[in-house]
Amino acid sequence: MTEFMRELGSTGLEVSALGLGTVKIGRNQGVKYPSGFSLPDDQAVTQLLATARDLGINLVDTAPAYGISEQRLGELLTDRNDWVICSKVGEEFDKGESHFDFSAGHVRRSVERSLKRLRTDFIDLVLVHSDGNDMDILSNGETLDALATLKQQGLIRAFGMSTKTVAGGLAALEASDLAMVTYNLNERDERAVIDRAAKAGKGILVKKAFASGHACLPGGATDPVQASLDMILGTPGVSSVIAGTINISHLRENVEKTHKALSAAHKEATGND
């Protein structure tokens, strides 16, 4: 396994330390980025995906709530076996608003729809797209049970939850394969979930690593992206950082900074200068 590749807990999957988020190829309404943007055309998306793969990225993150992201990936993603695809269930985005359904029936319908949109026989990772009420979702039992059944049937390879609370993240790890947590320079509460995952052999994906484009450290880092990656990838238990971009230059810079962060983490862990 190369330095850039990391084990995703005990799922048996290896993922790149930097994953490609794809909100911006499918939706530009109701997003929290600092500036507006237009959806890229098919040629631009094809070039983005090819560049990501050439740079060693194998993890791509999407969701039904990301507008037409899944459909576009299904049409434009080549060499399916080269990619680890992560999608979600629970949140739908329609007419500019999100709504949520965590019932077992919706989970199955959503995954079956994603399979068709992505033009694949299986999805590597499926996460519950939390509405913020993590413990309520987990307490009903049926959401994760439905995903466990889909895993047994071979339609998904691993499942977990994209959580919004520490309690939810910890509980999700107890009942599934992985969690996606918020962890950045200004939001570190969910470090407790990462620490638990490291001990339990569960996978961790990090979202909002750059605070949705608002990365900053009061009075501090001259390069907040590098500082963010240094901190996150230097934290034991983190498998991959999901960063969304449609800018190839930013993608290349992010990969370069990821390698620097990994090198720094390796030196610190081994005590080598």
Image: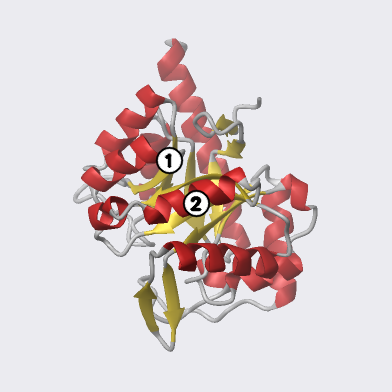
Mark 2 crowd level (few <14, some 14–19, many ≥20, 10 Å Cα): many
Instruction: Say which amino acid is labelled 1.
Output: Ser
Q: Which mark is residue 176?
A: 1
Numbered label attached to residue 140: none
Badge 2 is on which residue?
147
Where residue 194 appears, as percent x and y from the top left, is: 34, 34
The residue shown at (73%, 56%) is 121
Between 154 and 15, the residue placed more toward the observer is 154
209 relative position to 120: left or right: left
Check disc 2 and report its element: helix, strand or loop.
helix
Of residues 208 and 106, the one drawn nearer to the viewer in this rendering: 106
In percent of width and height, residue 157 lies at: 60, 44
Task: Depth check: give the residue in front, 239 or 107.
Answer: 107
Circle nearer the N terminus (1, 2): 2
Drawn side of residue 227 relative to residue 14, left or right: left
Quarter of the image where one finds residue 246? bottom right
Amino acid at dot 2: Leu
Q: Is residue 219 left or right of residue 83?
A: left
Residue 165, position in %: x, y? 24, 50
User: Residue farthest to the right?
Assistant: 79
